Image (cartoon, rainbow, N blue to C red):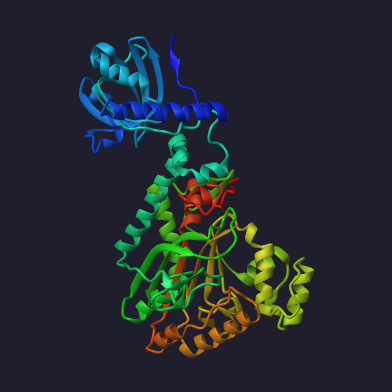
Amino acid sequence: MAEIQDNTNSLEDLNDILKARREKLAKLCEMDKNPYHSVRFDINTYSTYVLTEFEKYEGQNISIAGRLMSKRIMGKAGFAHIQDSKGQIQIYARSNELGEENYTEFTSFDIGDIIGVKGIVFKTNKGEISVKAIELSLLAKALQPLPEKWHGLRDMDLRYRHRHLDLIMNTDVKRKFELRSKIISHIRRYLDDLGYLEVETPVLQGTPGGAAAKPFITHHNTLDIGMYLRIATELHLKRLIIGGFDKVYELGRIFRNEGMSVKHNPEFTTVEIYKAYADYTDIMDLVEDLIVKVSESVLGTCFLEYQGEKLDLSRGWTRMTMIEAVFKYTGVDFSCITTDEDAREAAKKAGVTVKAGTSWGNTLNEVFEQTVESNLKQPTFIMDYPVSVSPLAKKIPKDSRLTYRFELFIMGREIANAFSELNDPIDQKERFIEQSRQRQAGDEEAHMMDEEFVYALEAGMPPTGGIGIGIDRLVMLLTNAYSIKDVILFPTMKPLVRN
């Protein structure tokens, strides 16, 4: 009768399983066969290569290694499946091929154990490509059982907490992270080919800046000063433009002490790109071309599906100003509104309530966020943001209430934020002073005064276009992931309360 490995959720049975596995390990150690003493195993191919190129491998001796995922023992013969980094393949083991001792060891292997296999590639009578084992080695003992295949690791919270199990049991999850790596690699290649220089700027900063966000606070013991984890890379990258680099970018982690949701994680990844002698229209062209080419290169198409909705990333993305977008979706024309009070009244008619004293620009932005953003499914550039919410962007001369700033929205989510960068040190300092007033009034996300950056601007920064792209949200779109946690290997999680 076949022996089928079975995992159970019973606590009593689980304890028995844990005990049995440790007893097996102890016995192996007594026999001087501690599997953890294995230091290497020579592999010469992977499961997927054998399966897809069978004619090349048939009858050949191969050496592969991976995790034992199933096992069936039928007397003096048995079948198993091992999973390596590329996929799974069946193993056929017979006592007369392996020898009685090695075969007996095979029968004692547990699901989840890491094993090495040397054998001959063949096809069974049922047509399954397999490896006839000549030698089997236990390379690492799994003391914890894997989740049962059909009823195991489905709870999303547990999957995020135990990502190693999620990757073992769910091949589609592993595929997402492989795609993430390819997306990042293609972004780098795209920028490198255009002559951009990849750089690194400080993660620990004395003054956090470049975004409206609350920072994480830490302390440097030797200097005895408070420091912050960066909330953006913008201000240091612009100092490099001032220093004479015309095209720079940084791809790395950002930290913001904010809430968590399907589109927010306190630790996330961005790429920020800066080009001297360019404006925000040049940057629009750049980001559109970048995303199109990455999609084509990684996925082979620009026509995708995201959470049941069709998404067309092909060129020719919509461009409209924030005022135009608000008028389109609410009928309110902020270009005809001149006072803060009238703006608040117009917002109220559009179904948006703002606080007393809210300015024209903040009101326009609030109406946009509440009534427009969710409608922007296909790629859309929203341009010309109010200066009150854009302290690092250059003003538009014909209407100083607005700036040369755009954000890219896809499927109702902000994917990128860009400016024609403010390079007037006097204007920049005045805006920092205004932001400082807002911080003193209780806005923890308002910018701090950054004297070092203002000093750098005084040396002269050329007209510059810059952008920050949310890598995690872009990967979500390209891999059809619902939550940002699905594309971050180890997302931030609330600690479990243990008794």
Image position, residue 34 (x, y; %): 29, 32
Image position, residue 202 (x, y; %): 38, 71
Residue at 44 percent across and 57 percent down: it is 291
Residue 425 makes an appearance in the image: yes
Residue at 37 percent across and 13 percent down: it is 126
Image position, residue 94 (x, y; %): 29, 13
In the picture shown, does residue 485 fall above or below 415? above
Locate the N terminus by quadrant: top left
Whether residue 43 sits left or right of residue 379 in the image: it is: left
Residue lying farthest to the front in this orientation: 30
Whether residue 479 sits left or right of residue 245 in the image: it is: right
Image position, residue 493 (x, y; %): 54, 52
Whether residue 46 sits left or right of residue 450 in the image: it is: left
In the picture shown, does residue 338 fall above or below 310? below
Q: Nearest the camera: 412 or 83?
A: 83
Q: Nearest the camera: 491 or 393?
A: 491
Q: Nearest the camera: 86 or 96?
A: 96
Query: How many numbered marks have been drawn onto this rendered protein structure?
Result: 0
Locate the C terminus by quadrant: top right
Residue 9 makes an appearance in the image: no
